[in-house]
Image: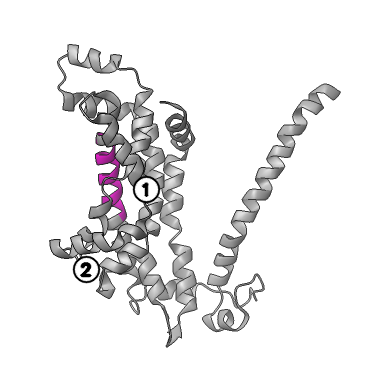
């Protein structure tokens, strides 16, 4: 009996550690939600804290978001559109490239893949100016295409899909060719169903990256009604006044799509991340 309790001790300690970590990460979210129920004047006067008069707590800040007095609904819809398009294109095109690296042999394959790895090490800020010049010449400034076009093929996703696919036996390809599938048919009908865990893991990753993207959309977009959500919320902060009530409520409401995305695909997330990290 004592031996059994001794064996359970590490598990209990680990669970306590994870519980503490979860609480630490949830505290800012709880603080954000509580503050969103307070009037903007209280936030300006007392700052963000858990001290709140629940008798005066209300959801007026959330009503203001969609009252038509600001462009928040447009910003929200713009972010949904841009994120959906970017995630779908980035997953599909990056998976195609990763599939080619993993399953085919061609001249210069290793050199090209090395270039992909080198591009992963380049910070976004380094290529902002060349990207902006390219988008300007193409006429996509103040256009949704200008936001997601440079990021529809992502080195990080290419690397991940390549690592995942290396662990899949090539016997699937040989069997499909014997059955008369074309190379495109093999990828679309055989490989993509096998890649569901990797798509789920990278879908969460890329969805978060696109939804939270701030610097590049801020540079590309000009019109207020075309801004994405992070850029629009930042515009509420100005030298002439800070709309903290709308800002905090808007930030709180902006978390919902990411929570839904993770809830839908979380059962594949660990499997996909583990497989992509150890195979190869």
Quadrant where the image shows the C terminus? top left
Q: Nearer the viewer, residue 63 or 169?
A: 169
Q: Which residues are magenta?
A: 83-96
What residue is disc 2 on? 142
- The answer to whether residue 161 is magenta is no
The image quadrant of residue 112 is top left
What residue is disc 1 on? 206
Q: Circle 2 — which element?
A: loop
Quick check: 254 above or below 262?
below
Quick check: 193 above or below 44?
above
The image quadrant of residue 65 is bottom left
Lower position in the chain sequence, tag 1 or tag 2: 2
How has the structure been colored for display? one colour
Q: Circle 2: is it few (<14), some (14-19), or many (20+) Cα within 10 Å?
A: many
Left or right: 192, with 202 as reference point? left
Give the residue displayed 30% in from the left and 27% down from the top: 102
Give the residue displayed 45% in from the left and 46% down from the top: 262
**Callout count:** 2
Q: Nearer the viewer, residue 63 or 258?
A: 258
In the rendered image, residue 107, in percent from the top left (x then y), is placed at 20, 27
State the CA–CA distance, disc 1 to disc 2.
Answer: 22 Å
Quick check: 195 above or below 116?
above
The image quadrant of residue 199 is top left
Q: Circle 1: is it few (<14), some (14-19), or many (20+) Cα within 10 Å?
A: many
């Amino acid at each position: 009996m004592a031996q059994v309790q001794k064996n359970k001790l590490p598990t209990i300690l680990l669970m306590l550690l994870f519980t503490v970590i979860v609480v630490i990460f949830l505290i800012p979210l709880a603080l954000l939600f509580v503050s969103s129920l307070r009037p903007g004047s209280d936030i300006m006067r007392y700052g963000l804290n858990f001290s709140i008069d629940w008798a005066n707590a209300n959801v007026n800040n959330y009503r203001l978001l969609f009252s038509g007095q600001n462009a928040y609904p447009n910003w929200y819809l713009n972010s949904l559109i841009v994120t959906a398009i970017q995630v779908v294109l980035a997953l599909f095109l990056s998976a195609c490239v990763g599939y080619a690296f993993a399953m085919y042999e061609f001249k210069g394959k290793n050199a090209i893949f090395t270039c992909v790895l080198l591009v992963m090490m380049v910070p976004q800020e380094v290529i902002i100016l060349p990207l902006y010049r390219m988008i300007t010449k193409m006429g996509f400034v103040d256009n949704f295409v200008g936001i997601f076009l440079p990021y529809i093929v992502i080195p990080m996703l290419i690397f991940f899909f390549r690592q995942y696919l290396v662990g899949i036996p090539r016997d699937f390809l040989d069997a499909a060719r014997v059955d008369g599938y074309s190379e495109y048919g093999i990828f679309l009908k055989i490989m993509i169903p096998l890649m569901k865990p990797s798509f789920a893991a990278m879908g969460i990753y890329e969805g978060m990256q696109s939804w939270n993207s701030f610097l590049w959309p801020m540079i590309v977009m000009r019109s207020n009604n075309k801004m994405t959500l992070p850029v629009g919320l930042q515009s509420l902060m100005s030298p002439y006044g800070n709309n903290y009530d709308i800002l905090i409520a808007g930030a709180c409401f902006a978390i919902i799509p990411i929570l839904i995305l993770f809830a839908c695909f979380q059962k594949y997330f660990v499997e996909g991340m583990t497989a992509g990290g150890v195979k190869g």
